Amino acid sequence: MTDRGQAWRWVRCTVALLAACGILVGIVAPASAQDDGTSDRTNAAYWYGLALARHASIPREQLAALESYREGDTVTDAVRSARAALMPVFDAMDRAARSSSVDFALDYDRGFRMSAPHLGGLRTVARLMRQDATVSFHESDSAAAAARLATIYRVADQVSRDRLVISSLHGQVIFAMADELVGRAIDRGRFTPADADRLAQAIRSFDEADPFRFGEALAIERAFMSDWVITEFGGEGARSPEELSGLVDDPVARLEIAMLEPSQIVSDANNAAVMMDAVLVAFGEDDPELARHDLARIAGEVKDGDFGVLARAMAPDFVRLYERLLESRRLVAGRRAWLSALSSGVVASGAVPLRAFANAAEWYLEAIRELEVLAPADLQTIRQVAMRPELPPDDTQVSLLLRQEPIVHALIEAATLDRCDFSIAGAARPAALPPYLPGMRVAAWLLQADAVRLVHAGETDRAVERHVASYRMVAHLASDRSIPSSLTAHRLFLNLATDTRRFVEHGILVSPQRETLGAQLDRLTQADPFGYLQAIARERADLAKQIPTPRID
């Protein structure tokens, strides 16, 4: 079967599935005759409703301390009070997330008039659960943090089962809310194998091809734009076109719709169904570039009015939704791979420490944040000591360096890690100057300056430890696949090499210390020690993505 045939089959199966579930308009029973099911304790919606009611009963000011809590802040009595007040809320959320079925009793017969009031509340409570997990990490309770984050993952999955575009978007946002903290915890080496396994179980139910069910949601949109519109505005006893026009935001389209005859509404609704079928076909394509091309073409035809005014005024932004779909695939697949590696095999048996998965960039970025609060005069002093290694620091300079010992230890800790991924800094690529590079230069000055202090104090072993960390920093920057990072790594290496040469020439280093530093030099790839080649390749690829390539059909 061709890719196109497979895509059409995907559409037919999706629509058939929704019809079988009684979701498509005209198949479900009238709302007045339906049992909403939200009083059923086997339904997750019951527990979510209980959680939201409990949350609403807590004074907003009591939650402020937890809402504003940031990682590393002191856990105050106000934070503890908020967490205690929210415990029944979180318990209900956890109970809901573990339920095998969820039905929010949404009235699909209302079509575009339907509301989903649970979404905003669940997103708010999920954010509070994330804050609670952040506090648990601060208290070194990774198990409690993992439990909260696993619940948020499950909430994201259940919210997406509404089969509404807005619900799929909320599901993705809620998932990312937890996932950002999970990623940072992995980078910090905070999870145990058991924690990782708990999280892996929580994301197991997400579909690989469409984690947040955008395809099913678009099938519902198709039903709303065709079946529902025809039923409500195109048949006998139909509602007035003015009511239909009130559902759109564009004032010009509103005027056009208000002037339509019922027969024209039916025709436009059928055209909208054809358009949405084509969109669903594109969503089912295996080749993302082909899908993008097709969706861009359809969007242009919709804008030109080829499918009528209803399609132009009421169609979702399917081009953007497709990008969200691709993003969701990468997001879920990437996290699933990490958690699987953390929780299974040699890792689970303890043969490989979880620190092997930690990210040195987390430590570097934290050190940079600490250095940023130093006065400019202090930073200049640190640089002066680093650049003049032959001069012993005076008492004031020594005192300044001693106050930075916690930062030095964080940098040394970062240097012990193999993995370093600065993408967590969120810098756009390609970048003329990644925002962390100035801070990395200051961090390198600090390590060199502290090594100078220790050499003049006769503590050469500790001085060598700082130089080892500096060489590892060079290697980490060289692996960043960024030309500015390669240039920075090269500059730092030249400074280090000068100091190392001076140590050797003045007989400061004994044989084992020279071997230790030599081993660090061996870690730099001879063919591309500062990562210029891979940086150029990466920058070229990034630029190519930003230069549109015309497609010839």
Image: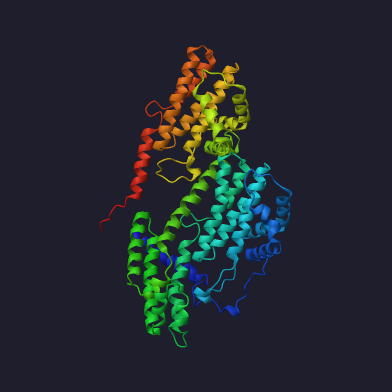
In this image, 95 relative to 292: left or right? right
Identify the residue shown where x is 67% and y is 52%: 66
In this image, 532 relative to 120: left or right? left
Identify the residue shown where x is 57% and y is 25%: 450
- Residue farthest bottom in this picture: 237
> How far across and how far down the image is residue 199, in percent?
59, 48
- The answer to whether residue 454 is visible is yes
Quadrant that contains the C terminus:
bottom left
- Above/below status of 507 relative to 172: above
- Above/below status of 19 relative to 71: below
Quarter of the figure with residue 451: top right
Q: Nearer the viewer, residue 326 or 403?
A: 403
Identify the residue shown where x is 41% and y is 45%: 429
In this image, 258 relative to 411: left or right? left
Q: Nearer the viewer, residue 165 or 14?
A: 165
Q: Which of 380 and 23 is in front in this view?
A: 380
- Above/below status of 90 relative to 53: above
> How far across and how far down the image is residue 441, in percent?
49, 32
